[in-house]
Amino acid sequence: MSKVIMKINVRHIAKLANLTLSDEEIKRFENQLEKTLTYISKLNEIKTDNVEITSQVTGLENVMDEDIPRPSFSQKEALKNASQNHNGFFVVKAILEE
């Protein structure tokens, strides 16, 4: 990938993550991302022509653990450190728009 595309990707990822990055941080993350992608691209060099396709290798199917109830906080205990609550529920700032 070219440096221009890398810079756009880092800025875009930072924007999506609501992060404010300095130019120095962007440069550092560009280098880290480039090294990571270069390393991952080595997977393309692996010869897999004679390898059987698998979806999983353990042979396990539908493993279910028993649902065992355990003691937990009461509603009052769970809400005691909440900055806001209403009718027994946590009140949090909305992050999704209607």
Image (cartoon, rainbow, N blue to C red):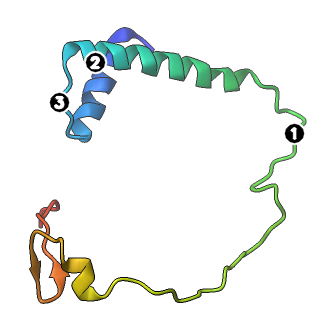
User: Residue 32's quadrant in the figure?
Assistant: top left
Q: Is residue 84 left or right of residue 66?
A: left
| Residue that numbered label 2 is attached to | 26
| Residue that numbered label 3 is attached to | 20
User: Residue 91's quadrant in the figure?
Assistant: bottom left
Please name whichever residue, 39 or 22, is drawn nearer the observer in this view of the structure: 22
Amino acid type at mark 3? Thr
Q: Earlier in the sequence, mark 1 or mark 2?
A: 2
Q: Is residue 70 left or right of residue 44?
A: left
| Residue that numbered label 1 is attached to | 51
- Closer to us: mark 3 or mark 1? 3
Q: Is residue 41 left or right of residue 50?
A: left
Quadrant (top left/top right/bottom left/bottom right) for the N terminus: top left
Q: Is residue 88 visible?
A: yes
Tell me the element at label 1. loop
Q: Earlier in the sequence, mark 3 or mark 1?
A: 3
Q: Position of residue 86 (x, y in %)?
A: 9, 83
